[in-house]
């Protein structure tokens, strides 16, 4: 009964032309919403950040992470390996094979010989010349690096026998990895595959006789090992000439004499005399 009495005035006011009671939806529209607090920033995503290490290599000197390819590009490459190879053969040619042994991997043990045994093995060579070719690409795997380089070798033995070899030399070093010392990161020879080649042995001495325009006859004895020619007229030795570079034919000079020969035609110049036109006798 009391609840009815309380609501009658409200109904009576509405019927007498007062303001209508607000509806529920209109009341919700007029409510001022409280401001929401600022939300915190998204937490960082899990995973390596730009300054993190990649493959155990610090990226500190780089603005971006270092990739394995970048790391290899900054390491000593095939050109440095070729320089080590040339240094190795230069030491052998200079008679310093014991110093060349030091350029073998594993503190020389990769050569398979002791320092003394290695040096003794080169005592049979009188001359030793090596031509180092273009190195191949650097091969990498498990933190190790390898480069293979072609090499050609020639010279003479102590008994003047010529020799020649050709093949490859392989160099090794360790990459920039944990535990790699500065010495292990340097190129060293790990193996050599040099195969002897057959050398055409020149005929030591060849004799030719030249008939010259003034009626003289001159004998020439060619020493193809020493690269010289000795000229004689009858029993008289005129002199010994040494071989010279020639675009075509042959050219010898020395002791004030000169011999040029192309085919059967030759020109011989004696000291203080005009050149003689000569023909190789059949």
Image (cartoon, helix red, strand yellow):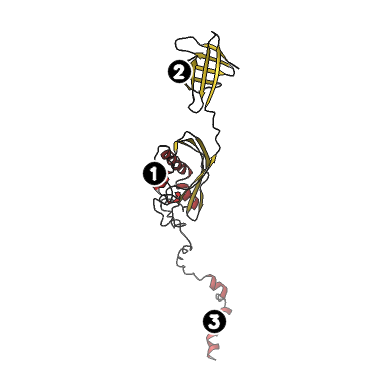
Could you classify mark 2 by the number of other residues whose Cα lies within 10 Å: few (under 14), some (14-19), or many (20 or more)? Answer: some
* Closer to the camera in the image, 5 or 210: 210
Q: Is residue 204 above or below residue 114?
A: above
Whole-percent x, y for residue 84 in the image: 44, 42
Q: Which residue is mark 1?
A: 98
In front here: 199 or 33?
Answer: 199
| Residue farthest to the front, as pictured | 235
Callout 3 secondary element: helix
Q: Is residue 102 visible?
A: no
Q: Alpha-carbon neighbours of circle 3 within 10 Å: few (<14), some, or many (≥20)? A: few
With respect to residue 163, does 107 lie above or below? Answer: below
Who's the residue at 46% across and 44% down the image? 81
Marks 2 & 3, CB-CB < 8 Å contact = no
What residue sits 54% from the left and 72% below the top?
Answer: 28
Residue 175 placed where, x, y %? 45, 52
Task: Examine the rendered structure and indicate whether residue 59 appears above or below residue 8.
Answer: above
Mark 2 → mark 3, Cα distance in angstroms: 150 Å
In this view, the residue in front, 275 or 32, is 275
- Residue at image mark 3: 10
Q: Quadrant of the N terminus?
A: bottom right
Q: Nearer the viewer, mark 3 or mark 1?
A: 1
The answer to whether the residue labelled 1 contacts the one labelled 2, judged by CB atoms less than 8 Å apart, is no
Work out how far the residue at label 1 is from the one at label 2, CA to CA, in angstroms. 42 Å
Residue that mark 2 sits on: 239
């Amino acid at each position: 009964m009391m609840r009815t009495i309380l609501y009658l005035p409200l109904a009576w006011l509405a019927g007498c032309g007062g303001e209508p009671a607000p509806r529920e939806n209109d009341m919700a529209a007029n409510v001022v919403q409280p401001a929401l607090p600022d939300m915190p920033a998204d937490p960082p995503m899990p995973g390596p950040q730009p300054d993190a290490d990649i493959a155990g290599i610090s990226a500190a000197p780089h603005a971006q992470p270092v990739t394995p390819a970048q790391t290899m590009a900054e390491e000593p490459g095939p050109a440095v390996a070729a320089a080590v190879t040339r240094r190795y053969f230069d030491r052998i040619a200079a008679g310093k094979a014991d110093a060349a042994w030091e350029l073998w991997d594993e503190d020389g043990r990769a050569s398979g010989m002791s320092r003394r045994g290695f040096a003794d093995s080169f005592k049979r060579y009188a001359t030793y010349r090596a031509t180092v070719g273009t190195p191949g690409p650097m091969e990498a795997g498990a933190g190790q690096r390898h480069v293979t380089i072609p090499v050609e070798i020639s010279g003479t033995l102590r008994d003047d026998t010529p020799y020649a070899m050709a093949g490859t030399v392989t160099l090794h070093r360790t990459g920039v990895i944990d535990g790699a010392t500065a010495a292990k990161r340097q190129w060293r020879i790990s193996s050599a595959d040099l195969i002897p080649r057959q050398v055409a042995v020149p005929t030591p001495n060849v004799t030719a006789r030249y008939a010259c325009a003034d009626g003289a006859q001159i004998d020439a004895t060619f020493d193809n090992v020493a690269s010289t020619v000795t000229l004689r007229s009858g029993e008289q030795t005129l002199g010994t000439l040494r071989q010279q570079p020639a675009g075509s034919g042959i050219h010898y000079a020395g002791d004030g004499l000169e011999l040029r020969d192309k085919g059967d035609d030759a020109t011989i110049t004696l000291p203080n005399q005009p050149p003689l036109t000569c023909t190789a006798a059949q």
